[in-house]
Image (cartoon, grey):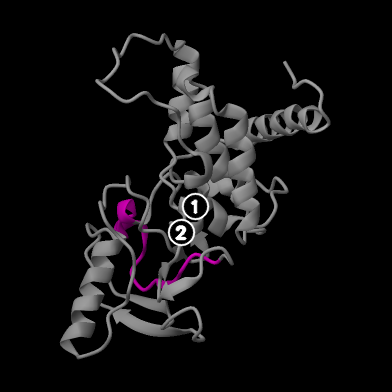
Amino acid sequence: MNLTLHVWRQKNARTPGRFVTYAAPDVSEDMSFLEMLDVVNERLIEKGEDPIHFDHDCREGICGTCGMMINGEAHGSLEGTTVCQLHMRFFKDGDEIIIEPWRSRAFPVIKDLVVDRGALDRIIQSGGFISVNTGSAPDGNAIPVAKGAADVAMDAAACIGCGACVAQCPNGAAQLFVAAKISHLGFLPQGQPERWQRAEAMVAQMEQEAFGSCTNYGECEAACPKEISIDFIARLNHDFLRATLWRAPKARGGGGAG
């Protein structure tokens, strides 16, 4: 198939960007979207032009680095799919495709389609961990975990931190990402010691970054390649409110919530 690509090119966050049009002839329907970009880049390099810069790593839908907007949708229009899993058979001969980086104040452009998602890393560093004792590995059966709790925790842990929820949200909110990271630890017994501290610290860090506020549009859930439910945001709000109420009496010299 023959395609026309309108690709956002931008030298860095301080330089204005613009769309540049490229022809993509003889594209195989068996290619992934990233493989198609690889071929386009090979042709650009052969002509002595600067290739299109984009993030990628595993190309198996696991690492979350390949995020980009395709025709205005994070990771493209195919549900539950990352860009590296999107194949060209879902496009038609003669299609024009608009390719942009994540659009969010919290994700400044590094170059072309590459953005700085360090804000997500800083949120994890603020509280996305559990206490462990050093030494030999504990017995896997030492701490019983209820089947229901384990299943829900795994659903939340499916988050790959790609940032599609932020990019698709009209407000640029990060609540779904933060909710998933808080919930997958909060449902497990190992995550209980820091449960309330974790919620307060991660929400505080989220608010320090340039993310917007959640107003329940639901676009985050629709764009998530791992189809993580916005129900986890309710869990986030519960834990954060509980942490705030627990701290307030202590600040006044009283006892905390039980």
| Residue that protrudes farthest toward the front in the picture | 253
Q: Which residues are magenta?
A: 84-103
Residue 241 in the image: above or below residue 215: above
User: Residue type at mark 1?
Assistant: Arg
Is 190 a magenta residue? Answer: no
Horizontal and vertical percent position of residue 230:
60, 37
Image quarter of the N terminus: bottom left
- Determine crowd level at label 2: few under 14, some 14-19, many 20+ residues with C-alpha closer than 10 A: few
Image quarter of the C terminus: top right
**Which residue carries the number 1 mark?**
122
Horizontal and vertical percent position of residue 101:
46, 68
Image label count: 2
User: Relative to the observer, which residue lies in front, 41 or 239?
Assistant: 239
The quadrant where residue 218 appears: top right
User: Residue type at mark 2?
Assistant: Gly
State yes or no: discs 2 and 1 in contact (Cβ < 8 Å).
yes
Q: Is residue 218 left or right of residue 82?
A: right
Residue 183 in the image: above or below residue 36: above
Horizontal and vertical percent position of residue 149:
50, 17
Residue found 58% across the figure and 43% down from its top = 202
User: Relative to the observer, which residue lies in front, 95 or 142?
Assistant: 142
Element assignment for label 1: helix
Residue 196 in the image: above or below residue 49: above
User: Relative to the observer, which residue lies in front, 1 or 40?
Assistant: 40
The quadrant where residue 134 appears: top left
Residue found 28% across the figure and 63% down from its top = 34
Q: Is residue 111 left or right of residue 164?
A: left
**Which residue carries the number 2 mark?**
118
